[in-house]
Image: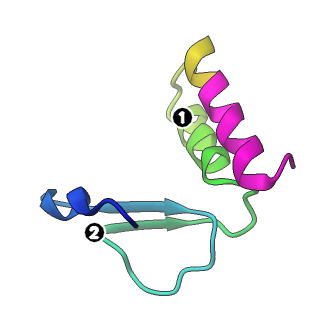
C-alpha cells in the first residue's frame, strides 16, 4: 500500500479478493472467488440490509470493471 496513513488508525481491516499472504489487520476478509473487492463490499452491504444508492452503485460498478479488467 503506497499511502501509509492507515498506520495511524487504531484498528485496520483488510477486504480483498487476492490470496492472503499475511494477516494485515485486526480483521481480514479475503474471498478469492470474488472478481473484485467491490463485489465483496456489495455483498456485505446486501447482507446488512443496506440500500445502495445510485452514486454508490456506480462507484462499485467502476471498481468491479477496473479490478476485473472488464469481467
- Up-down relation of residue 27 to residue 19 (above or below): above
Q: Nearer the viewer, residue 30 or 66?
A: 66
Please name the predominant secondary structure of the magenta segment in the image.
helix
Marks 1 and 2, how far apart at CA? 20 Å
43 horizontally vs 27: left or right: right
Disc 1 is placed on an element classified as helix
Residue that sits furthest to the top in the current view: 54
Q: Is residue 52 magenta?
A: no
Residue that sits furthest to the front in the current view: 2
Task: Look at 16% across and 56% down and name the residue there.
Answer: 9
Q: Mark 1 highlights which residue?
A: 45
Residue 5 makes an appearance in the image? yes
The quadrant holding residue 38 is: top right
3 horizontally vs 20: left or right: left
Task: Look at 69% across and 70% down and name the residue there.
Answer: 32
Q: Please state the horizontal and vertical placement of residue 1, each as a whole percent of the image.
A: 40, 67
Q: Please state the horizontal and vertical placement of residue 50, each as a whole percent of the image.
A: 51, 24
Q: Is residue 63 magenta?
A: yes
Q: Please state the horizontal and vertical placement of residue 36, each as a whole percent of the image.
A: 69, 54
Q: Mark 2 highlights which residue?
A: 26
Q: Nearer the viewer, residue 31 or 66?
A: 66
Residue 53 makes an appearance in the image? no
The stretch in magenta equals 58-71
Amino acid at each position: 500500500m503506497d499511502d501509509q496513513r492507515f498506520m495511524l488508525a487504531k484498528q485496520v481491516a483488510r477486504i480483498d479478493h487476492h490470496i492472503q499472504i499475511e494477516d494485515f489487520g485486526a480483521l481480514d476478509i479475503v474471498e478469492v472467488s470474488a472478481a473484485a473487492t467491490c463485489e465483496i463490499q456489495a455483498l456485505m452491504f446486501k447482507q446488512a440490509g443496506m440500500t445502495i444508492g445510485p452514486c454508490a452503485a456506480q462507484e462499485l460498478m467502476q471498481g468491479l470493471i477496473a479490478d476485473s479488467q472488464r469481467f
